[in-house]
Image (cartoon, rainbow, N blue to C red):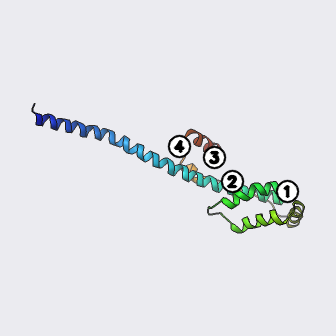
Amino acid sequence: MTFDAVDKLLWLLLGWLFGLLSPGIAERIRRKHRRVDVARSVKDELSQLRYLMAVVAYTMRARSAQVSDDFLDWLRPIVRNYRGPEANSKFAEALDLSRSKLTEEQRRAIDTALNSPTRGLAVKQQFLPVVEAMTSELSICPLEFQRRVLQIKN
C-alpha cells in the first residue's frame, strides 16, 4: 500500500467518524437551546396561571368581604409584575389605591355593599396548553423543574 492510498484511507475513516459523531454533536447543541426555549415557554404560561389564580382569589375574597391588608400585600406584586396578555393596569392601580386609602373595615363595607346575593360565583377549570404540549420535552430540563411543573399540572 502506498503512502497516497494510506492517506486516502485515513481521510475516508475520518469522514466516516465525523459522519457518525455529527448527529450526536448537533443534537447536544440543539438540546441545550431547546431546553432554554421549553423552560421559558412553560414559565410564561405558569406566570399567567399564577396571575389568573391570584385574581380568582381576590374575587372570592372580595365576594365574602375578606380582603385584608396582608392579602393585598401578597397580591399587589403578582398583579404589578405580570406582563402577559391578561394584564390589567387599572386593576393594579385599584389595588394600590385600596391598600393605601382604605382600611380593612372600609373595604369590607364596600365589598358587602357591592355583593349581590342573587349573583352566583363560577370558577372555571384552567388548562395549560403549552405545558400539555411540551410534557414530553420536559425531560430535557432539570429534574427539579420537571417535578415542579408536573406537580402544578396535576
Residue depth check, mark 3 versus mark 1: number of the one nearer the observer: 1
Mark nearer the N terminus (3 vs 1):
1
Residue 45 rendering spot, x and y as whole percentages: 60, 54
Residue 138 rendering spot, x and y as whole percentages: 53, 44
For image coordinates 35% across by 42% down, the residue present is 23
Q: Secondary structure at mark 2?
A: loop
**CA–CA distance in space, label 3 to label 2:** 12 Å
Is residue 55 visible in the rendered image? The answer is no
Q: Secondary structure at mark 4?
A: loop
Left or right of 53 in this view: 28: left
**Is 17 placed above or below 86 here?**
above
Say which quadrant the N terminus sits in: top left
Q: Residue furthest top?
A: 1
Q: Residues within 10 Å of mark 1 (few under 14, many from 20)?
A: some
Identify residue for label 3.
153
Q: Tell me, yes or no, whether the two marked residues, 3 and 2, touch with CB atoms within 8 Å.
A: no
Say what amino acid the circle numbered 4 marks. Cys
Say what amino acid the circle numbered 3 marks. Lys
Identify residue for label 2.
125
**CA–CA distance in space, label 3 to label 1:** 28 Å
**CA–CA distance in space, label 3 to label 4:** 16 Å
**Is 114 placed above or below 67 here?**
below
Is 63 in front, or is 32?
A: 32
Q: Residue furthest front?
A: 100
Identify residue for label 4.
141
**Is 104 placed above or below 29 here?**
below
Residue 88 rendering spot, x and y as whole percentages: 68, 66
Q: Secondary structure at mark 3?
A: helix
Say what amino acid the circle numbered 1 marks. Gln
